[in-house]
Image (cartoon, rainbow, N blue to C red):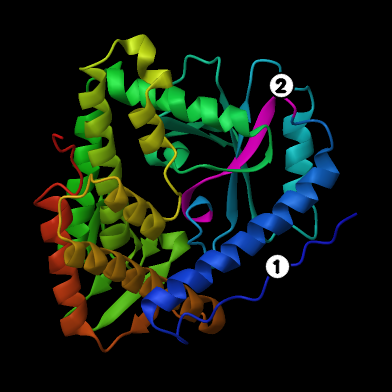
Amino acid sequence: MIIFNRPEKVNPLATDPLVYAKQIELYNEQLHNSFQEGLGEEMNQLCRHCSVITVGSDARYENWASRVEVVLLKGHDCEEGTLSALKDYITSEERAKYFDPVVEVKELSSEKPLYKSFIPRENEEDLVLFSPYRLMEGKTLYGDPEILREAKLLLAEELAIGKNRSTIKRIRNHVKAHAKVTETGAQEYGDNVLMHFDLKAGISYYDPELQIWSFKQGPLRLVQYTLARDITSILREIAQEIPHDEIFSNDEVHQLMFLPQNTVSKLQKLQGMVYVVPSVQDMFDIMDSYVFFLKLYHISQSHFISEGESVTEFSESKEIKERLEFLLDKCDRNVLLKRFEN
């Protein structure tokens, strides 16, 4: 049996944001390599017609301390026993602290939309999340990579053709909601108001059990959903110009659906594809601010894990306020990406 060795964590306090971005990306790459090696031994030939993928911050190479989420993508002839073997692997004694024990299953032949996530819950109905970006940014850990490729193109078809006309509206609503958190630090959650950060007091809050996430629900989600909004808008524009049966083979659709998972790398790639509206300097500042808040988010996580404290003080209130206002202007009040006529 391969013994899983988690690579040494990067210290979010030790370096400037853009250097830190590369360090945390490398850390996640090492994590993926460890998982792939272990999955390859434990699951053997069970993934010939399916794929084990990771999503969220793990897929974006931005995870610092959260447990890794995995999704099982099932093709048309997925082997019996694959899901149970995967659960056995991630819940084993030496791995349970690294993996989220809940495994979402997506079947490509199912009528369930791929832009929604159906998270199983014990003795309850599935938790249904509107989350097109999860699969859009998915990363194969083990199995047939063509399964994820097919799933992303099916997702592109759902988003572009608009079987559900409210899809783009819901993405825009998410942008607005995360923009409000970016502006105020507060988020309405059911009957409660959650405070993620307070600029006047110079503090951020982090407590996963209370759904309090420091700068995650504000500036980080704002940039992520802005990309999902603008990519979806471009896909829908493309769909108006070509027959629907050509979406799977369209080069531009492929370019948009197979972008780098990492947020900074994705923005750099899009800039090279001439989709970007802001200036070169503004794009650099967007990337820099994104990683700046990613670093602050990881500092909050680090403080919570090492000290057990949900409150983290910061001294850069003026800089944070300026960066938040900048992201609001570029992401919420304007489009970040669009197609330009040749």
Residue 130 visible at all = no
Residue 35: x, y in percent? 71, 53
Total labels: the figure holds 2
- Residue at image mark 2: 78
> 313 above or below 119?
below
Q: Hey, which quadrant is residue 53 in on the image?
A: top right
For this view, does 88 lie left or right of residue 156?
right
Task: From the viewer's perspective, tell me whether residue 79 is left or right of residue 28.
Answer: right
- The magenta segment is 48-58
Q: Which mark is residue 6?
A: 1
Quarter of the figure that contains the C terminus: top left
The residue carrying pointer 2 sits among few (fewer than 14), some (14 to 19) or many (20 or more) residues within 10 Å by Cα, namely some
Q: Residue 54, position in %: x, y? A: 57, 46
Q: Is residue 165 above or below residue 187?
A: above
Write the residue at 36% across / 21% down.
158
- The residue at 44%/55% (across/down) is 262
**Does label 1 or label 2 sit earlier along the sequence?**
1
Seen from the viewer's position, the closer of residues 59 and 183 is 59
